[in-house]
Image (cartoon, rainbow, N blue to C red):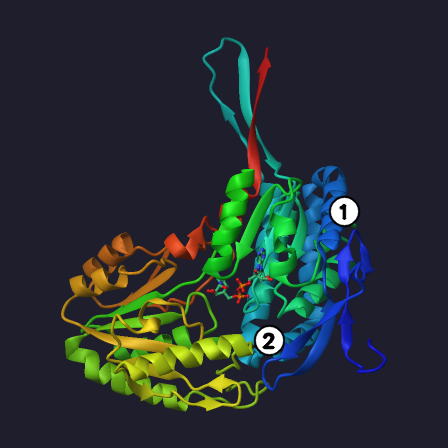
Amino acid sequence: MDAKTHTLTLQHWIGGDWVDANSGETFEVINPIDDSLYCHAARGTSDDMQKAIKAARAAFPGFKETLPKERERWLLRVAEIMEVRKDELIDCLIDEIGSPIGKANFEFDKGLTMLRAAAGMCRNMRGETIPSDAPGKFSMSIREPLGVVAIITPFNVPLIKTTRLIANALALGNTVVHLPSEMAPHLTILMADIFNEAGIPAGAYNVVTGMGHEIGDSLTSNPDVDFVSFTGSSVVGQHINEICAKNKTPVTLELGGKSPTIVLADADLEKAMPLAARSIFMFGGQLCIGSSRFYVERPVYDEFVKRFSMIASKVSMGDLRDPNTVVAPIISQRQRDRVRTHIEDAVKKGATVAAGGEWEGNRCQPTILTGVSEEMTLCREETFGPVTSIYPIDSYEEGLEKANDTEYGLSSAIFTQDINKAMHFAKNSGAGMCHINGPTVHDEAHVPFGGNGESGVGREGTDADMEAMTTLKWVTVQL
Ligand code: NAD
């Protein structure tokens, strides 16, 4: 605790010790609901980062030899302690990043499933036997952890990302250096404390807090880092991809999106409407898989706009601890400016606001725009706010073409009773994920989660991380 302000001051978690930044500096973490000070955190330097990478490297030889039953026990223990410390985690998700309690609980429950699924990976690290043309040769592959894994996470789902990625990396015998978002360090620090309490050996998991643009490169470009997992914006992802390509460091990039939903005339609107709303208004639209484009067949277009606008106007913007509240504050002034500019630019160029468009404090009302055209910024760029556009289409084919007319390719959805069109869309959508009669917002521990194009490279999830975070060694025995 800081004696003067009585706010929390977070330290790095390196090699099993809580340590200050070597510069002694800290930075402020702001509660987005009212811009009040939430806490201070150590402002990491590249020296701190080197120290964390060294600790992870030193811990690797011992950690990779730990038994599956030990890693399984530690990870299951993390889940148990999370349940005991649930209130702390939920409070943090509410006050650090402005999660409404419903979203915080959703993230907490999802986090538990991520950990338990990761625990199951420990016993599933399999190679195979391979036939050989050489007489008397026994041939096999052995699956091994990669080494030191760098994990960089965004602000919006810090618990899901921390539980999934850290747990998967550790389950496979890797050691980890984690750079959390500068807007959500406390959640990660709480989890580091929980991983420690669960018995994970010192140095296996390390956290350095700080400004990504100041210290990120010293992590991703370090030759002692064997794999980089990045989740965040496409701009930073591109930068990291270039660094990793230069150093031949394997990388997974989970980036932004402009995810489309097609609604055909035969869709069950009664069921589709609440799902459509959930797919863009949950957590104030600050979800990579949020649906920011709806393509609706003309016979139901007017009805869809009317009903969607009605729902939008009723979405609760109450207290974040009220279970009915859906709309979250936008995380930072920079991001609020972006959302505001996107709406203003669209309106100035002729778009119609069917619902919302106004602000209440740091929260943007759920906003629906029609008449959006190419020259408007939000037509193609990710807004990352509770803002979506509805476009009329004359046929499924037009919807498919428009849905795929994007640089992004994260999630996609279609609402229809026609299984042939639905499956055609599943096969031809340019996105990495496609949901039939379900919202673009969906995730589970064991699915291949990820996107194409500007939305990223590679997938995450238990099976995908098994491939990404391990390597196969070919071994022969001449009998
Ligand atoms: P961001 O790109 O600003 O930051 C993400 C992380 O990158 C932070 O930890 C930041 O500190 C770090 N960073 C910044 N510069 C860096 C550098 N040079 N090297 C290494 N790390 C650096 O993103 P954000 O605003 O926190 O999150 C929002 C974005 O994340 C949106 O674009 C959203 O779509 C995307 N996102 C994607 C997924 C997915 O799974 N595809 C999930 C959540 C969020």
Q: Would you identify the image quadrant in which residue 339 lies?
A: bottom left
Q: Position of residue 311 (x, y in %)?
A: 36, 86
Q: As shown in the figure, which amino acid type bears the numbered disc 1? A: Ala
* The CB of the residue at mark 2 lies under 8 Å from ligand 1: no
Residue located farthest toward the top when viewing the structure as drawn: 135
Q: Would you identify the image quadrant in which residue 34 lies?
A: bottom right
Q: Is residue 278 above or below residue 181?
A: below
Residue located farthest toward the right when viewing the structure as drawn: 3
Q: Is residue 344 left or right of 90 when viewed as pictured?
A: left
Q: Is residue 108 left or right of 341 when viewed as pictured?
A: right
- The answer to whether residue 204 of the structure is visible from this angle is no
Of helix, strand and loop, which one carries label 2? helix
Quadrant of the image containing the C terminus: top right
Pick whichever of labels 2 and 1 is earlier in the sequence.
1
Q: Which mark is residue 354?
A: none
At x 69%, y 69%, the residue is: 186
Q: As shown in the figure, which amino acid type bears the numbered disc 2? A: Ile
Q: Is residue 150 above or below residue 419?
A: above
| Foreground residue among 296 and 442 | 296
Q: Is residue 391 left or right of 154 when viewed as pictured?
A: left
- What is the distance, in whole Å, between disc 2 and disc 1 at their CAs? 29 Å
At x 63%, y 67%, the residue is: 182
| Foreground residue among 457 and 44 | 44
Q: Residues within 10 Å of mark 2 (few under 14, many from 20)?
A: many
Q: Which residue is mark 2?
A: 97
At x 54%, y 13%, the residue is: 137
Q: Is residue 433 left or right of 472 when viewed as pictured?
A: left
Of helix, strand and loop, which one carries label 1? helix
- The answer to whether residue 410 of the structure is visible from this angle is yes
Q: Position of residue 41 (x, y in %)?
A: 73, 69
Quadrant of the image containing the N terminus: bottom right
Q: Which mark is residue 55?
A: 1
